[in-house]
Image: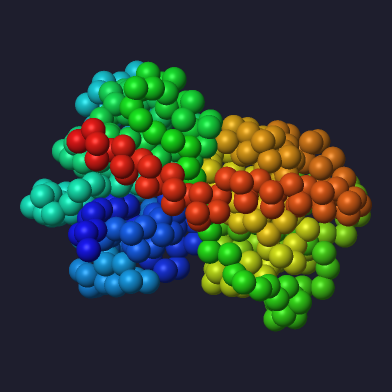
Amino acid sequence: MAKKLKIGIVVQRYAHDINGGAEYHARLIAELLNNDYEIEVFTSKAIDYITWEDHFKDEIEIINNVKVNRFSVRKPRNPKSFGEIQNFILNEEHSINDEYLWMEEQGPLLDELLLNLEKRYNEFDLFIFFSYRYYHSFYGIKKFKDKSILVPTAEHDDIIYLRLFKNFFHLPKAFVYNSLEEKEIINKISDNKSVPGDIVGVGSEIPDKFEPESFRKKYNIRNRYFLYIGRLDENKGIPMLFDYYLTLLNEKKIDMDLVLIGKEKIEIPKHKKIIHLGFLQNKEKFDALKGSEFLIIPSQYESLSMVSLEAWAIGKPVVANGKTEVLKGQCIRSNAGLWFENYEEFKEIILLLDKNKNLLINLGENGIEFFKKNYTWQVIKEKYNNIIKKSLKTS
């Protein structure tokens, strides 16, 4: 029996109760590939993405049969200092050294992790780094470029235009892109079309059955509702969502409540039609999604939005912020979602979906077909296997 290839997956955080973003993405891919390859994860001891303070005590943990190596962050992030340097580099003339300082302040400063990878370099055939913009990926790929694959999880924001990254995007052996739009923006900024890569994305852990009525009963949800799933903070467009929804309620009578799932970082308005449930485990999250009319994604910055794929997988439409090129593109290609760029468009979409059951059904059916064609685990695994094979041939 041939020895399995050994692959290290490197990501900023890794835990059971992170149910979105690059970290959840990384966990799903680690578990997907663990049957065909020998997988080890390298990550921080942090759970808080704002400060990166150590949270986990153990240096080694087994999560769903995957070995996870955790390392202390050299220095927690100071949100005030980080905010100041980020504001400076995005709004003022600055030097490349200022951008290096930004990277240092952003963190997570995982020097021990990178030293460990260096010591164990010969054990591994490849490393897969998640999230281009963080310290571990930036310095890890520079150090181990001959064995590196990058899953950039890039958003079309101002950070991607920093001088730090123009040459950086030429270094990996290959890219695993989340979307056509992500690939296009990275290719345009860095002119790295010669670096191999494919548009892959990620699948999801879809339960075998759903119990939306049990969910409704448990949380005393009586009305029809649309759903938000994710962090409740400014970067995710939540203040805008509250503003638009409350304005609409003042103007029109609509049947649907707004239900929110996720940890809050901002104050949530006290209103009987806004229901916040906090963090839910995967099964309850899907029960909530199945019982909803549609999923709403107000964020202006997304590299893929895994929860949109989960909605489409179970036949639920998506209403997205059209300023997010990736989500707008996905809605167009799937014909399973609608998008808004201002309050008037938001209002028209909500009023339309509030009264048009057939449209909800048709959009949901299109979503199922889109997911089956592009995001089943079989499709995802085949693409990863091909990228891994090509990377090893060019090593």
Is residue 323 placed above or below 346 in the rendered structure? above
Splitting the image into 4 quarters, where does residue 103 fall? top left
Query: Horizontal placement of 367 versus 391: left or right?
Result: right
Tell me which residue sits at (20%, 36%) in the image.
395
Q: Position of residue 79 (x, y in %)?
A: 36, 48
Residue occupying the far left of the picture? 119
- Residue 368 in the image: state x and y as whole percent: 69, 52
Q: Is residue 98 above or below residue 375?
A: above
* Rendered location of residue 282, percent (x, y): 55, 69
User: Could you say which quadrant of the image residue 284 lies in?
Assistant: bottom right
Image coords of residue 49 (percent x, y): 38, 55
Along the horizontal axis of the image, is 104 left or right of 319? Answer: left
| Quadrant in the rendering for residue 211 | bottom right
Give the camera-side residue of 241 and 191.
191
Indicate left or right for 230 with 225 as reference: left
Image point (45%, 68%), residue name: 17
Whether residue 167 is visible here, answered yes or no, is: yes
Q: Residue at x 87, y 60 (%)?
A: 255
Q: Is residue 14 visible?
A: no
